[in-house]
Image (cartoon, grey):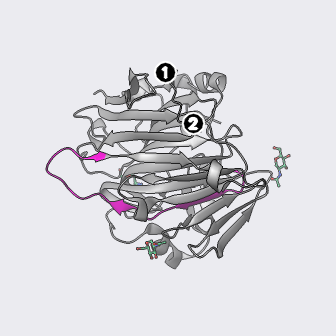
Amino acid sequence: MSFKTTAVIFLLATQSNIVSASPVSTGSHSGSGKLVKVPGGFLPIAKVHAIPPGGTIVHTADVTQLLDVDGSVLHSATRRANATFSKPILSHTAFAASKEPTEAIPGRNQKRSLLSASVSALWEAPSVYSFISRWTVPLLPQQGHQVLRYYTALVPPSADAIIQPVLQYGTTAAGGGQFWSISSWYLDYSSGTAYFTNATRLPSTQGTQYLSPFVINNDEFGGTPSLPHAWYFGFEYWQTQTGVNLYTTEDYRYVYVSLEVTNATNIVELPSEEPTILDNIVIGTTSEGGYASSIPWSIQNDEEDGVSILIASSSGAGGGGALDIRYTS
Ligand SMILES: *[C@@H]1O[C@H](CO)[C@@H](O)[C@H](O)[C@H]1NC(C)=O
Ligand SMILES: *[C@@H]1O[C@H](CO)[C@@H](O)[C@H](O)[C@H]1NC(C)=O
Ligand SMILES: *[C@@H]1O[C@H](CO)[C@@H](O)[C@H](O)[C@H]1NC(C)=O
């Protein structure tokens, strides 16, 4: 399965200019069999769930549950042998090998196939206790039907799931529209379900706007023998809207930064006027507050589409790390 299939989550038949209503609630009017596109395939809309404010996700080896703030179970999904959507590719060798020659991808023989483009940076850390960074919110791109998702994720070695605070332009199952919005996602490939917090529109500001996604490990206080790993993720200053508690059996120690572009037709539908910067990257690797002094990122670029990710600084300590996403015409 192509790395390209880690595409954007979005509704196939979304009216992208409906900005206030969540497409999930809109979609429920047209029947329960509706499919939404998720990375690597499609899911029935019934498998894609909104996380309530203060909600919790519990992912054991056998079952994934969404809990309301009072602890009641809203949804429960069991592990299946064959998931309907594919995992992201994560091993270093598979990651490098997944760069397919252009001619091998049907419909992608031409430059600028921005209908499905992505760039990413990956690091297999020994362990992750915190992953904090800062996006400079890009200028608004030219309006189209594109969906852009910038995210800073953690993934377990099995690649069965992904913790994903997302900066988004366009409309996805979480909502959004032709503006920048944020939401937290958890994709569970093992049970074929996806979870999101409703997209929150970022206010328009005159000056430069910064946004700090975070994933924090809380094993020490939140872990139990059966669910040793406790996580809290979202965006700083937007925790009411985006904060999600997660309990897992697996450890999440692959650090993954990506831009996924879906359904763009031209480079101007990307914020191509200047590089998009993720900086202040700090990756805590020990419970005692130790940090990676240097991060040996594996990079996957998308040269034929003119999108690339560059290591501006591989530092992992003191907020010195930075990645730049560049767009060339
Ligand atoms: C993709 O873009 C085209 C126009 O370029 C639009 O008609 C279509 O609805 C879009 N698809 C999605 C899923 O947004
Ligand atoms: C998400 O937004 C939709 C549409 O606005 C709303 O119906 C739903 O209650 C919201 N869900 C949560 C969990 O806030
Ligand atoms: C699951 O995948 C295996 C291996 O690809 C296949 O043999 C089997 O038929 C699949 N099972 C279902 C229920 O699709």
Question: 228 or 7, which is in the foreground?
Answer: 228
**Part of the protein shown in magenta:** 188-210
Residue receiving disc 1: 294
Residue at 60% across, 27% down = 95
Look at the magenta stretch and give its main secondary structure: loop
Q: Which quarter of the rendering shows the N terminus?
A: top right
Q: Per the image, is 196 magenta?
A: yes
Q: Which residue ends up furthest to the left in the rendered image?
A: 206
Q: Quadrant of residue 99?
A: top right
Q: Position of residue 131 (x, y in %)?
A: 49, 40
Residue receiving disc 2: 288
Cβ atoms at labels 2 and 1 below 8 Å apart: no
Q: Secondary structure at mark 2?
A: loop
Mark 1: amino acid? Ser
Residue at 27% across, 42% down = 138
Q: Per the image, is 23 magenta?
A: no
Mark 2: amino acid? Glu
Disc 1 residue lies near ligand 1 with CB under 8 A: no
- Left or right position of 241 against 189: left
Looking at marks 2 and 1 on the same chain, the residue that comes earlier in the sequence is marked by 2
